[in-house]
Image: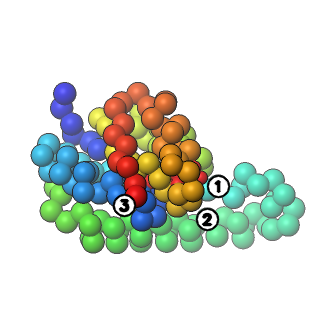
Amino acid sequence: MEIQKVLWPTDFSDGARAALPYIRSLAAGHNAEIHVLHVLEDVFHHEGWYGEFDKEHIEKLMEKAGKKAEDRLAQICDRYLEGCPLFIRHVAVGDPASEILRLVEKEKMDTVVMSSRGKTGSFSFGSITDRVVKNSPVPVTVIPAE
Ligand code: ATP
Ligand code: MN
């Protein structure tokens, strides 16, 4: 099996970063692209917000959040992914597990590597990782987080 595209989803937590050493060596060994994805929660889903805030304001907020996420992804690439041949950044809006799976299909990722935990870290196995493992059409490697 040829591995050309590796997807690493991150919520910017320390837990998520536990997957990085593995991703770096996997990608380097295969000369593969590293795709980094952050998913922003869509505030439009909270119906109550419609009445309280105007749409334009929310749109501006989302735009700002999107730019901030892009900056943070760029920072990660600079700081932790030097030496990898290629990295591609993605920002999506919506439910994290659905967006991760959607990008797998859309970009035809060969594999997903992600940590067992994220930001919340209160359970031994995160709900997003759980859903990705159970629904992904490609192999998923789960890196145990401390
Ligand atoms: P909880 O299930 O309560 O959220 P958790 O935050 O510890 O617990 P997950 O959310 O499943 O666990 O996080 C595990 C991994 O899922 C993260 O390390 C990251 O790879 C991915 N992930 C979670 N949220 C996002 C997100 N918003 N964008 C991209 N990846 C995410
Ligand atoms: Mn989480």
Q: Nearer the viewer, residue 20 or 107?
A: 20
Q: Any atom of ligand 1 within 8 Å of the CB at mark 3? A: no
Q: Position of residue 57 (x, y in %)?
A: 72, 70
Q: Residue at x 40, y 38 (%)?
A: 104
Left or right of 92 on screen, residue 72: left
The answer to whether mark 2 and mark 3 are in CB contact below 8 A is: no
Left or right of 85 on screen, residue 134: right
Is residue 62 shown above or below 143? Answer: below
Is residue 15 shown above or below 135? Answer: below
Left or right of 33 on screen, residue 139: right
Q: Residue at x 49, y 30 (%)?
A: 135
* Residue 62 - label: 2
Q: Is residue 107 visible?
A: no
| SS assignment at label 3 | helix
Amino acid type of disc 1? Asp
Q: Position of residue 56 (x, y in %)?
A: 72, 67
Q: Which mark lies nearer to you, 3 or 1?
A: 3
Residue corresponding to mark 1:
42
The quarter of the image holding the C terminus is: bottom left
* Residue 17 - label: 3
Q: Any atom of ligand 1 within 8 Å of the CB at mark 1? A: no
| SS assignment at label 1 | loop
Q: Quadrant of residue 46?
A: bottom right
